[in-house]
């Protein structure tokens, strides 16, 4: 077998194998005169005899190998020394040695260059990997993100040698980007919640042969069944220094699916079907599209009927989202009467009672030895929710109210002595409340409720101070309870207080309300007020009510009532928010107040449109906006209406959002569970989106429709100092 040309022959008889690990090679090797010993380790020539003769019996034999010409003709000398001397040479470095030497000198030169360059003033250009993206162009100092940069040249070298690298720690990012407490976990979601999501995905998982090979291999490494929770840094996905035109949010599908249990090559091939998309919850504003289209908008002669969807909805060009025009632009023409209440100036029973006098059977109490002093004979209603909550701030009164339960205080003929004693306790508690309100007005309400609830809840009632004013309440309370202070002092001294009937024997609440918000007061005879107050107090109270009515306060039906003067009234909103914060479970005091506030018969009718969510945690939220402006939670799905409306115009709405003629939302009073879907529209199918989103390179990418950060986020802080702590709150 012939050896290929140019290769050494490895037969020891014909070739002497060169060992490439030797630092020095014999200089005579190039002309075939390589000595058998070769150079020393320091490069010195060790040329000498061509062989070491061997003594065979009585003679010496030459041992020169065949590869070097075989035995010489002269043979060894008689003394056994070799008669052939190898010429001396100048040893040369081997290939490996030359490479090592070149590498070492290159490193020395490079380090020297770096030391000189980095010691100069304009050294930053040397390590700058490229321009920043458009969102970060204002960051001019490398140390703002790279911690090792702040240590100077020594810090860089230490980071490189110690293996710490020059990466950007997450702390440098969240100074400006507040992504919640779990920002370093997948999707920014706490590990416990992610475990629940993963368990649900495992139940719905369906194996597919279409799994991409690359993402499947990555999943086995990064997200296998025994892999601990991943910790993902911001720089794992967001690559900086790619220029102003680079989108930091750009990610490939393989990067997304490296961790996901369900993996598929494209949106059209393997993506799960939609479920109730886009309805993640019931709408916060309870608008019945079907009812308006079928009933209200079909009434003839109306000029304010919307012509298209964009007559009410507005496209936000900044975010691509859809909002709604304000109440005044699209709702006021039909619903102003619902907010302001009845137009008849004499009708006041529909106004919201803030403080109401309960009707009490004083005769039965007196006949069985219980005394409550003077009590208005015309009072016949029960305790409204807010009054009951205020009275319950006293421990003995709260116990009395619990003992009475739902019993009417005006129907106690068959009540036990214990129940009558409870009625007496409630009556005197109410009179003490009246004294406090004569003294401090709305502040008395704050004082009594503060020990029972949080400061945040009490703050919601601050607006009431403007209507429950001392100058308004003083004459009204004196008209209801003449001699109130003397009676309470006498009762607290342990003396028997004689029963006195005040006011008229009966009254119709609809005949008592003198005014509507914003209407002038009628100043005339005391009889114009009806049997609301003692005749002696009528003239004084008439002027007070005239002032109060402008602010929406009405003293009628033995109650201090409130009627909102306009939509968005802060007093009504404060009452709703207070009740929501106080309520922790259905049927409690806060829940009872909510039930009263959202009655459709009451003026304002806030809950006719604004839903009230009771979340599974028990928290109650009143939805004043179509979208919760203070909700910083991002969903997994994102959608921009702007490009879709631009393609098809206003018809694009009906192309995707199809009314369901079988849906029946029905009237609500705001008690909506947000997790129970109520919608007039049919869900959008995956096939509808797939008709256009077929291009996997752009329109079919994961990030086209999905957010990675699906937990709490807050807006980016513009021009934030990079070394400050995370802002506590950003508007």
Image (tube, helix red, strand yellow):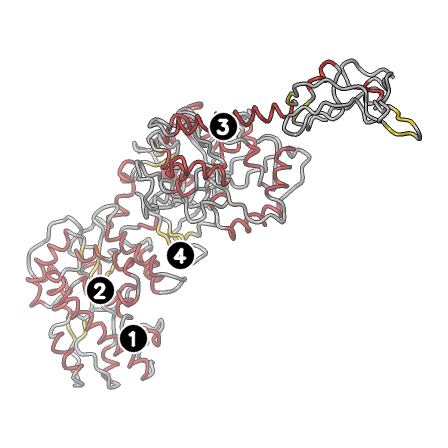
**Could you say whether the residue bearing mark 2 is in a helix, strand or loop?**
helix
Query: Where does the image place residue 249, in percent across and percent down from the top left?
Result: 45, 32
Q: For mark 3, what is the residue?
A: 108
Q: Position of residue 171 (x, y in %)?
A: 40, 43
Report the residue marked by disc 4. 619
Q: Give how far apart the Cα atoms at labels 4 and 1 are.
A: 26 Å
605 or 494, nearer to the observer: 494
In this figure, which residue is indicated by the disc labeled 1? Answer: 395
User: For the image shown, how many numbered marks are present on the structure?
Assistant: 4
Instruction: Say left or right for 625 vs 11.
Output: left
In this view, the residue farthest toward the front is: 79
Q: Quadrant of residue 166?
A: top left
Q: CA distance from mark 2 to mark 1?
A: 16 Å
Vertical placement of 623 versus 310: above or below? below
The residue shown at (22%, 61%) is 509
Q: Are marks 2 and 3 in contact (CB under 8 Å)?
A: no
Looking at marks 3 and 4 on the same chain, the residue that comes earlier in the sequence is marked by 3
Q: Position of residue 148 (x, y in %)?
A: 41, 38
The residue indicated by pointer 2 is 445
Whether residue 651 can be seen here: no
* First in residue order: circle 4 vs circle 1: 1
- Spatial CA distance of label 1 from label 3 is 86 Å
**Mark 2 vs mark 3, CA separation in Å:** 82 Å
Q: Residue at x 69, y 35 (%)?
A: 209
For marks 2 and 3, give the one nearer the viewer. Answer: 3
Q: Earlier in the sequence, mark 2 or mark 3?
A: 3
Whether the residues at callouts 4 and 1 have beta carbons within 8 Å, the answer is no
Q: Earlier in the sequence, mark 2 or mark 1?
A: 1
Query: Residues under labels 3 and 4: Cα distance?
Result: 68 Å
Position of the C terminus, as image quadrant, is top left
* Label 2, label 4: how far apart the Cα atoms are: 24 Å
For the residue carrying disc 2, how many other residues have a C-alpha within 10 Å: few (<14), some (14-19), or many (20+)?
many
């Amino acid at each position: 077998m012939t050896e290929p040309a140019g290769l050494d022959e490895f037969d020891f008889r014909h070739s002497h194998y060169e060992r490439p690990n030797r630092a020095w090679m014999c200089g005579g090797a190039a002309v075939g005169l390589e000595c058998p010993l070769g150079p020393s380790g320091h490069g010195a020539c060790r040329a000498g005899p061509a062989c070491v003769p061997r003594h065979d019996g009585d003679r010496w034999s030459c041992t020169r190998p065949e590869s070097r010409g075989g035995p010489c003709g002269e043979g060894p000398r008689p003394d056994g020394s070799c008669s052939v001397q190898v010429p001396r040479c100048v040893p040369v470095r081997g290939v490996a040695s030359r490479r090592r030497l070149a590498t070492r000198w290159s490193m020395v030169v490079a380090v020297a260059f770096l030391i000189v360059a980095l010691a100069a003033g304009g050294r930053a250009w040397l390590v700058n990997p490229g321009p920043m993206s458009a969102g970060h162009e204002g960051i001019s100092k490398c140390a703002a993100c790279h911690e090792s940069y702040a240590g100077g040249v020594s810090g860089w070298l230490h980071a490189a040698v110690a293996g710490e690298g020059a990466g950007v720690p997450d702390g440098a990012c969240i100074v400006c980007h507040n992504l919640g407490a779990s920002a370093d976990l997948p999707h920014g979601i706490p590990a416990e919640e992610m475990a629940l999501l993963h368990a649900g995905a495992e139940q719905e998982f369906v194996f597919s042969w279409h799994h991409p090979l690359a993402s499947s291999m990555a999943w086995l490494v990064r997200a296998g069944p025994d892999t601990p929770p991943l910790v993902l840094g911001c720089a794992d996905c967001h690559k900086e220094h790619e220029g102003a035109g680079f989108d930091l949010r750009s990610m490939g599908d393989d990067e997304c699916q490296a961790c996901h249990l369900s993996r598929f090559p494209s949106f059209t091939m393997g993506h799960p079907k939609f479920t109730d998309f886009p309805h993640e919850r019931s709408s916060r504003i309870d608008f019945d599209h079907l009812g308006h289209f079928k009933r209200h908008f079909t009434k003839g002669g109306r000029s304010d009927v919307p012509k298209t969807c964009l007559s009410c909805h507005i496209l936000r060009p900044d975010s691509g989202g859809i909002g709604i025009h304000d109440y005044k632009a699209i709702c006021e023409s039909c619903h102003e009467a619902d907010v302001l209440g009845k137009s008849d100036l004499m009708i006041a029973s529909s106004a919201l009672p803030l403080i109401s006098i309960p009707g009490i059977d004083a005769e039965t109490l007196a006949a069985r030895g219980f005394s409550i002093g003077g009590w208005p004979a015309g009072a016949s209603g029960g305790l409204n929710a807010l009054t009951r909550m205020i009275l319950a701030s006293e421990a003995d009164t709260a116990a009395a109210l619990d003992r009475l339960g739902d019993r009417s205080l005006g129907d106690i003929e068959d009540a036990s002595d214990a129940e009558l004693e409870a009625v007496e306790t409630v009556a005197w508690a109410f009179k003490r409340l009246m004294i406090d309100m004569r003294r401090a007005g709305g502040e008395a309400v704050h004082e009594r409720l503060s020990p029972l609830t949080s400061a945040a809840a009490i703050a919601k009632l601050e607006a009431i101070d403007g209507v429950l004013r001392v100058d308004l309440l003083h004459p009204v309370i004196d008209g209801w309870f003449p001699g109130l202070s003397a009676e309470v002092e006498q009762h607290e001294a342990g003396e028997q207080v004689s029963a006195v009937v005040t006011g008229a024997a009966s009254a119709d609440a609809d005949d008592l309300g003198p005014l509507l918000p914003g209407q002038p007061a009628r100043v005339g005879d005391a009889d114009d007020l009806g049997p609301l107050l003692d005749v002696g107090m009528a003239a004084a109270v008439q002027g007070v009510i005239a002032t109060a009515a402008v602010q929406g306060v009405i003293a009628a039906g033995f109650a201090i009532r409130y009627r909102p003067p306009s939509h968005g009234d802060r007093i009504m909103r404060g009452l709703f928010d207070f009740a929501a914060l106080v309520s922790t479970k259905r049927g409690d005091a806060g829940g009872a107040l909510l039930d009263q506030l959202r009655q459709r018969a009451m003026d304002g009718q806030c809950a006719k449109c604004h839903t009230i969510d009771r979340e599974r945690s028990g928290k109650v939220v009143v939805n004043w906006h179509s979208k919760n402006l203070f909700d910083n939670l991002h969903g997994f799905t994102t959608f921009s209406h702007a490009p879709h409306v631009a393609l098809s115009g206003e018809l694009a709405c009906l192309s995707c959002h199809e009314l369901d003629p079988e849906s029946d939302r029905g009237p609500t009073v705001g008690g909506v569970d947000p997790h129970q879907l109520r919608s007039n529209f049919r869900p959008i199918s995956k096939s509808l989106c797939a008709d256009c989103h077929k291009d996997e390179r752009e329109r079919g990418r994961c990030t086209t429709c999905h957010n990675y950060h699906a937990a709490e986020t807050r807006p980016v802080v513009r021009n934030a100092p990079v070394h400050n702590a995370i802002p506590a709150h950003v508007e």
